[in-house]
Every structure is written in structure tokens, then in C-alpha cells.
Image: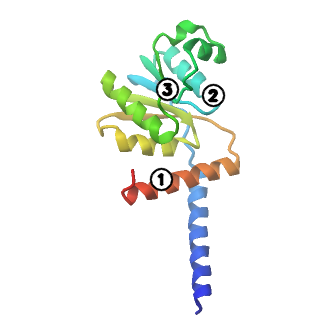
Amino acid sequence: MTLAGVLLRLVAVLALGWLGGFLWFSLTLPDPAPLAVKTDAVVVLTGGAGRLARGLAVLEAGSAKRMLVSGVDRRTTRKQLAAAADSPQSRFSTTDLGYEAIDTRSNAEETARWVAQHQFSTIRLVTSAGHMRRARLELSRVLPPAVLVVSDAVPVEPKAPSIAAEYSKYLLRRVALTLGAE
């Protein structure tokens, strides 16, 4: 067998492995957590439709006492968030705005600092269904094992390219962490 034949087979095996993983990833997207599940706090990662509304619904239902919105633009105020959410500003009285995060990894680091500061032992993580696994992966890297994280995925209309991109990012990050990269 030629080197080209070996390389072609290797590429085919890798492509089939990626495709199988993508199917698993797509068919097992997480669901929202029931509002009856109570946690100390709720963490909303910015960047997608429905996330802030879900976090506010969690607070309103009494399912969490405090909320962190991680990855907020530095120029954004509570008043602007309230207007964007079409919600009274008073609903943000137990909300902290996290201005430090710029990506999923820094969302996790910002969340870990906030959890430690408030000594929370349970949090509800709100992000899109496609983003949830990578966000949980990053949180597992920085949160103490004793902190329970409840996944509360905001449903999304799955579109193959965006789900494929999320799966690829998740896969690459898992490999990087396995190889010892931070």
C-alpha cells in the first residue's frame, strides 16, 4: 500500500469518527432544566437569544437567589439590559454583571471567581443547547468538584453548520485539555 493510500484511509477514518461524534452531539442536545429544580444561583452566558430571559424566569420562579450575567460588554448597564429584556430594572436587583469574560474559557473563570466570592454550592448554567457541553467542560476545569452545576439549555433551532462548529470547538477543547493545555 502506498503512503497516499494510507493517508487517504486515515483521513476517511478521522472523517467517519468526526461524523459519528457529530451525530451523537446533535441527537443528544441537552434540554432546559425544570424550574422546580432549585440552585443557589443562576449563571447566564451572553451570546445567544433567550438566555437572559431564561435567567430572569429562573429568578422570578424563585429557583435561584442570585444571577450572574457573564460576558457583558463593558459599556452595558443594568438599565440597558432591562430594556433589552423588556423587563423592569428592579428585576435586576439580584443580578451581577460580569464584564471580564470574552469567550467560553473566560466565562468559566469569571463564574468560578463569582461562585467562590458568594460561596455558592449549586449553580444553574444557562446557555444554548449547542454550547452547553463546551461551557460545562470549561467550568469543570475551574470549579471545585463539590459545586453542583445544573444544565439549563436554551432550546435552539438546530442548524447543521452552527451545531457542527460547536461540536468541533468542543472536540478541539477536549483534545487540548487531554493533552494538558489550559
Question: Residue at point 52% right, 36% down?
Answer: 102
Side (left or right) of 159 relative to 105: right
Give the label, 3 or 1, closer to the camera.
3
Q: Secondary structure at mark 1?
A: helix
| Of residues 34 and 159, the one drawn nearer to the viewer in this rendering | 159
Q: What is the number of the mark on residue 99?
A: 3
Q: Nearer the viewer, mark 1 or mark 2?
A: 1
Residue at screen point 32% across, 24% down: 117
The residue at which mark 1 appears reads as: 173
Residue indicated by mark 2: 50
Quadrant in the picture for the N terminus? bottom right
Q: Is residue 105 above or below residue 84?
A: below
Label 1 Cα neighbours within 10 Å, binned few <14 / some 14-19 / many ≥20: some
Indicate the amino acid at tag 1: Arg
> Which picture quadrant has residue 141?
top left
Q: Residue furthest bottom?
A: 1
